[in-house]
Image (cartoon, helix red, strand yellow):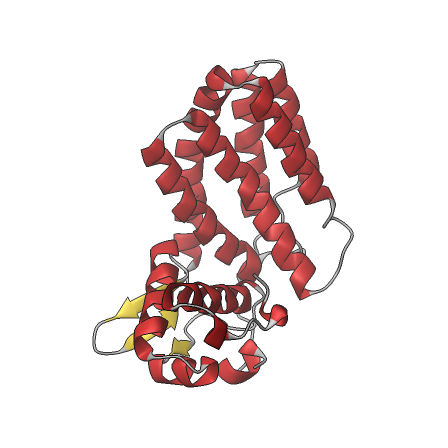
Amino acid sequence: MPLEEKIPLTETNAEDRAVIIRESLRNAIIDRRLTPGTKLSEAEVGELFGVSRTVVRSALQMLTFEGLINAERNRGAFVSNPSPDEARQVFASRRLIEPGIMAAAVARLTDEDMVAFRKQLEEESLHLHQRGPSARRAEIKASGDFHLLLAKVAGNVILQKFMDELVARSSLVIALYGGSGASSCGHSEHEAILQAMAQRDAERASALMLHHIDHIEADLDLRVRDGLALKDALDL
């Protein structure tokens, strides 16, 4: 949920407050307003949002699970700072896992699944020619959702959990280091993959997926960028 909606936290319960804070921090990370290594103080975040440190801690735990922040004992929480090697490992992991997910998804694919995939591609297309931080965030999310839908259709709960983390980590890497300024998870490549799936051609779909992952990684630009202070990044 975009930070711009400014939902009053006083009108929500503790769990919802934690989710709202998690989304605000996540958006700031994906938008590059919070750069790798930025410290997320429980006290400062709590003061900015007007909530207790317990609520903030819950939000930070969600982000830790996604791999977007690192929690260091006796030091606090910091925005994850993926090194070039770590970024390569994320995509190496995806190359190992996603062809298997693709084969399973094609084997289980139904007409209802195809409808869901086409709706997902329609969602992606809405953001192709838009500009600005919110459009970039929506584009990255929509692109990642295509891969998460594949994992869901494959029907393996364990692999689905792995993909949740890999897509979150990929989104961070793409947002921070995407050289083109837009998500490299190309809409046209998703369309080609879906066409191969519709033809029940698992081998071709898997090959297209590997090419697609190669394309995402090839677009990375690992130069260091400057960021903003926590208060300015959250625009509160």
Identified at 69% across, 58% down, the residue is: 135
| Relative horizontal placement of residue 26, taking residue 54 as reference (left or right) | right
Query: Which sits in the foreground, 85 or 114?
Result: 114
The location of residue 173, given as percent across then percent down, is: 50, 56
| Relative horizontal placement of residue 179, taking residue 94 as reference (left or right) | right
Q: Is 225 located above or below residue 115 in the figure?
A: below
Q: Judge whether residue 181 can be spotted in this image.
A: no
Residue with the most extreme front position = 11
The location of residue 199, given as percent across then percent down, is: 62, 14
Query: Which sits in the foreground, 26 or 182?
Result: 26
Identified at 39% across, 78% down, the residue is: 39
The quarter of the rendered structure image containing the N terminus is bottom right
Residue with the most extreme right position = 129
The quarter of the rendered structure image containing the C terminus is bottom right
Query: Which sits in the foreground, 67 or 84?
Result: 67
Residue with the most extreme left position = 74
Q: Is 127 located above or below residue 224 in the figure?
A: above
Q: Is 155 located above or below residue 35 in the figure?
A: above
Q: Quadrant of residue 57?
A: bottom left
Q: Quadrant of residue 182?
A: bottom right
Q: Is 147 located above or below residue 180 in the figure?
A: above
The location of residue 65, given as percent across then percent down, is: 34, 56
Q: Judge whether residue 234 can be spotted in this image.
A: yes
The location of residue 5, given as percent across then percent down, is: 62, 69
- Count of numbered tags: 0
